[in-house]
Image (spheres, rainbow, N blue to C red):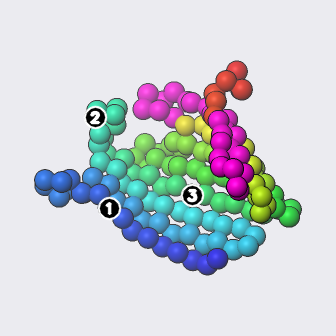
Amino acid sequence: SGFSAGVGARFDETSFDVRRAELSASYESDVFGVSTNYAFVDAHPEFGFLTDRHEVTTAGSVRFYDNWSVFGSSTYDITNKELDKYTVGVSYYCDCFLVRASYTEDKDNSGAIERNYKLFVSLRTLGDFGTDSDEFGK
């Protein structure tokens, strides 16, 4: 519970140029949590990112009944002035297990939208398993 903040960076191994830099802040309580993160990411043409990226990601969660909560996050591309990705979901957590279901829309470099549904289950003494798919919404 409480506030936290962080900074991070990745540097080129030979020139020490900044390849990625992040600044983050968050607050968490027993009822809700919020966070924000700014990231600079150097261009990676080999992965389809031809220019540097500047992004702001925000996230939040609210516990609404006993062990139930809703959550969401969004990533805004500052350079292109558009929402790049968002996720919404619901989760249930108790001492024995966690179940989380979510829906995500994510734009790729060409502007095409990828939609994913995810289900994650964690059984405290047995382990985790989960799946994601873009087939459910078709």
Q: Is residue 113 magenta?
A: yes
Q: Position of residue 87 (x, y in %)?
A: 63, 45
| Cα–Cα span, label 1 and label 3 | 19 Å
* Horizontal side, residue 51 vs residue 55: left or right: left
Indicate the amino acid at tag 1: Ala
Q: Position of residue 17 (x, y in %)?
A: 19, 56
Q: Is residue 126 magenta?
A: yes
Q: Secondary structure at mark 2?
A: helix
Q: Which mark is residue 9?
A: 1
Q: Quadrant of the N terminus?
A: bottom right
Query: Going from the N terminus, do you reach mark 3 or mark 2 first?
Result: 2
Categorize mark 2 by other alpha carbons within 10 Å: few (<14), some (14-19), many (20+): few
* Residue bearing the label numbered 3: 58
* Residue bearing the label numbered 2: 45
Categorize mark 1 by other alpha carbons within 10 Å: few (<14), some (14-19), many (20+): few
**Callout 1 touching callout 3 (CB < 8 Å):** no
Query: Going from the N terminus, do you reach mark 1 or mark 3 first?
Result: 1
Indicate the amino acid at tag 2: Pro
Q: Quadrant of the C terminus?
A: top right
